[in-house]
Image (cartoon, helix red, strand yellow):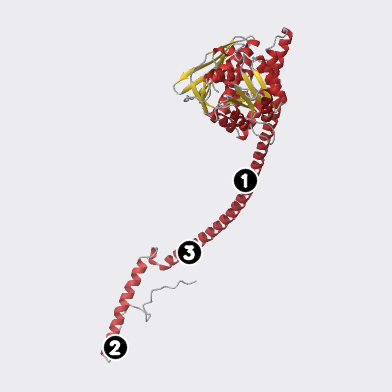
Amino acid sequence: MACISTRPSPGSPLALDRPRTIPEDASAREQELLEENARLRKVCGALIERVESSGAAGGAPYAAFEHAVLLAEQVRERTETLHRTLDELGQVNRQLRDEIAVRGEAEQRLRESKRDAEAANLSKTKFLAAVSHDLMQPLNAARLFTSALGEQAVPEASRRLVGNIGRSLQDVEALLGTLVDISRLDAGVLKPDVAAFRAADLLDVMAEEYRQIAASRGLALHYVGSSAVIESDLALLARVVRNFLTNAIRYTGQGRILLGCRRRADGLEILVGDTGPGILEAQRETIFQEFQRAESAHDPKDRGLGLGLAIVDRITTMLDHPLRLASSPGRGSLFSVRVPYGGRPAAPPSASASAWQHDALSGMRVWVVDDDPGICEGMAALLGGWGCGVRTATSPAELEADLDARAPCEAADVLLVDYHLGEGGPDGLAVATRLRKRRPGLPVVVITANHDAAIKSLTRQRGYGCLLKPLKPLRLRMQLIALRDGGSG
């Protein structure tokens, strides 16, 4: 196809560079218009030359046209690419929305499953608590009977049998207590009841109790007491120290056990050391996990579940008491917990050195109220063996009727009352209030299988003592002597 030039040919009437002749007979107006036309032609020609000279090589404006067409094509292609990308992004967004919806449904199912699991766990905890309370009653009675029998003059062979029964009951108590504790810790229903108390109130009884256990295994227990006042949950801290002592005796074949205290700037460090085989470096983390035990040799008759130190770790974390382990393989181990110092304790003073005299409680008058006849009988046997005068009843009405019939003005030195006294009846705190009207200022010790912090807090606020089932005879003895020495009531 022939290329058409935009420049007028010399012979064309549109030629701008050819002067145009003005007719002689033209009027002045025509002459003026013809001159103006010529001047505009020159301006137009100059503008065309300038445009062509500023275009592509060769001065052809067609090259500029082709370039513009090329740019337009590129713009079109990029626009189409952008539209395709936007379509793809829209599809991806739809897929993401679908995935988000699926994940939302999955999260909802997980939340529902979590609620179901938590409800099942709480139900399990309540079940274990209820079962443990029912089991604690006969177990408590059995412990009272064996303790009372152990203090009687019986042949040596029978004494060994009584000792074996007592240790078996302690094993059952430890296993049951461990299962209940780990369940309550997992469910988050175990709340600490923090109060100030003397370290001796906790450790003196433990030292005597575990001295006897250590002696039965041919071990010596050395105790370094402390007069410091600390602040913690007495029952939970007792669980920690008991686990320390139990493990020390369990894994020490020969030698000695140490129970002691060290005053630190930020608290009292309660420590338990042993001369056992020690713990390897690789095991010092795993032994604080559930069902993990040290690989060192131990008593094959031992019924431990490997939960003791796991409970220790959880309790000390909950109480914010730093835990420490130091061990040297072949030379023994030392576990310790650091407890903050406290102010003046609300509890009565610890029993004096006379606590271990056989007749320390002789003549003390004790009222016992428990809805379990077996426990009443066991308490009567145990306290009677200590020389106490005992009145027992399965209800406050029965006790009051007995007192009215025998001696209307008979006094008492202490009231031991169970917290749970049967369905529909008053609790131990209400009974204590009722009996204190008969005997103003009567010292009270509430005994319960319920470890709820609220119950312990209420008993402390009213100035009562509190002991947990299964009742440990040594702790009961220390509590009674402390009340006697304190002059309460």
Q: What count of labels does the image hold?
A: 3
**Around disc 1, counting alpha carbons within 10 Å, would you say few (fewer than 14), some (14 to 19), or many (20 or more)?**
few
Q: Looking at the image, is mark 2 or mark 3 earlier in the sequence?
A: 2
Q: Looking at the image, is mark 1 or mark 2 earlier in the sequence?
A: 2
The answer for how far apart the CA atoms under marks 1 and 2 are is 94 Å
**Around disc 3, counting alpha carbons within 10 Å, would you say few (fewer than 14), some (14 to 19), or many (20 or more)?**
few
Residue 72's disc is 3
Q: Nearer the viewer, mark 2 or mark 3?
A: 3
Task: Give whichever of 178, 15 is nearer the camera.
Answer: 178
Report whether 446 appears left or right of 164. Answer: left
Task: Give whichever of 426, 316 is nearer the camera.
Answer: 426
Q: Nearer the viewer, mark 1 or mark 3?
A: 1
Q: Are marks 2 and 3 in contact (CB under 8 Å)?
A: no
Task: Give whichever of 300, 183 is nearer the camera.
Answer: 183
Residue 383 rendering spot, x and y as whole percentages: 65, 18
Residue 160 rendering spot, x and y as whole percentages: 71, 10
Task: Give whichever of 225, 281 is nearer the camera.
Answer: 225
